[in-house]
Amino acid sequence: MLEIRNFSKRYGGHEVFSLVSFTLQEGTVTALCGDNGAGKSTLVRCIVGSEVPDSGEVVLNRELLPLGDTETSRLRGIEMMYQDLRLCPQHTAVENVFLGREITRFGIVLDSRAMHARAATLFNEIGLAELPLHRPVSMLSGGQRQAVAIARALIANPQVLIMDEPTAALGQRESKLIISLIATLRRKGLTILMISHRKEEIEQLAQGVLTIAQGEVRYCDNVALQS
């Protein structure tokens, strides 16, 4: 589904990573691990186009994507869910799901009914039918806010979803909610690259693990990791 070929990135004299290549298979969860400062966030930003690697290629479903072009990456099917979520707390769950992608009538009038119906269907499909759609996200729990951010990424029907530590700020109970949701998305065929530090989370969700250290990325499957 997604192939990264010979990615390299330097900041001045510091080499973040060099000639990194890997492939993500369709319908799998792959964990991206490494120490703080190892280059995980830089790597995913280069994939989605918010940074430009010094060299390399991104191939999505056999199509070569332009580097440094977030809009084209999104249109072709790569969505990024950032750790800070980037939600508008004063807006409702529905408004956040469609932020920047509002459904309109005649191109000018917001179609609130259509957006609510589409959001309700989406949350039902991912097993979160009880989430209060008209409540401001500032009044939602941490796990519910994460679910809203995930739903916003899913509304465009992406092929690949990149998640930056989706449970880092959550307690055990709400982490279980998000872990269950990620497992559901994988079963539906979504390809997921997930930055994570949590061993239990990786063991439960990931079919493979990419480890970045000293500018190199290595892959192992989860069976090898657990052994």
Image (tube, rainbow, N blue to C red):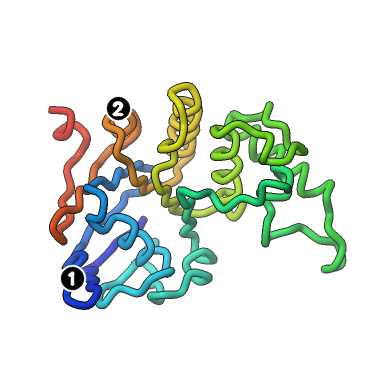
Residue at (85, 62) in percent of width and height:
105
Residue that extends furthest to the top in the rendered view of this protein: 173
Picture quadrant where residue 101 is located: bottom right
Percent of width and height locating residue 73: 47, 67
Q: Which of 51 and 25 is in front in this view?
A: 51
- Amino acid at circle 1: His
Q: Mark 1 points at which residue?
A: 14
Helix, strand or loop at label 1? It is: strand
Q: Which of 27 and 94 is in front in this view?
A: 94
Q: Which of marks 1 and 2 is in front?
A: 1
**Residue 146 drawn at (x, y percent):** 54, 39
Which image quadrant: the N terminus?
bottom left
Left or right side of 38 for 75: right
| Mark 1 / mark 2, whichever is N-terminal | 1
Percent across and percent down for residue 53 are: 30, 73
Q: Which quadrant would the C terminus be assigned to in this image?
A: top left
Dot 2: within a 10 Å radius of its alpha carbon, few (fewer than 14), some, or many (20 or more) residues?
A: few
Q: In which quarter of the image is residue 56?
A: bottom left
Please rate how many residues cluster around mark 1, counting C-alpha atoms within 10 Å: few if below 14, some from 14 to 19, many from 20. few
Task: Identify residue type, mark 2.
Answer: Glu
Residue on which disc 2 sits = 200
- Asked if 107 appears above or below 90 in the picture, the reply is below
Task: Please give left or right for residue 6 compared with residue 42 in the image.
Answer: left
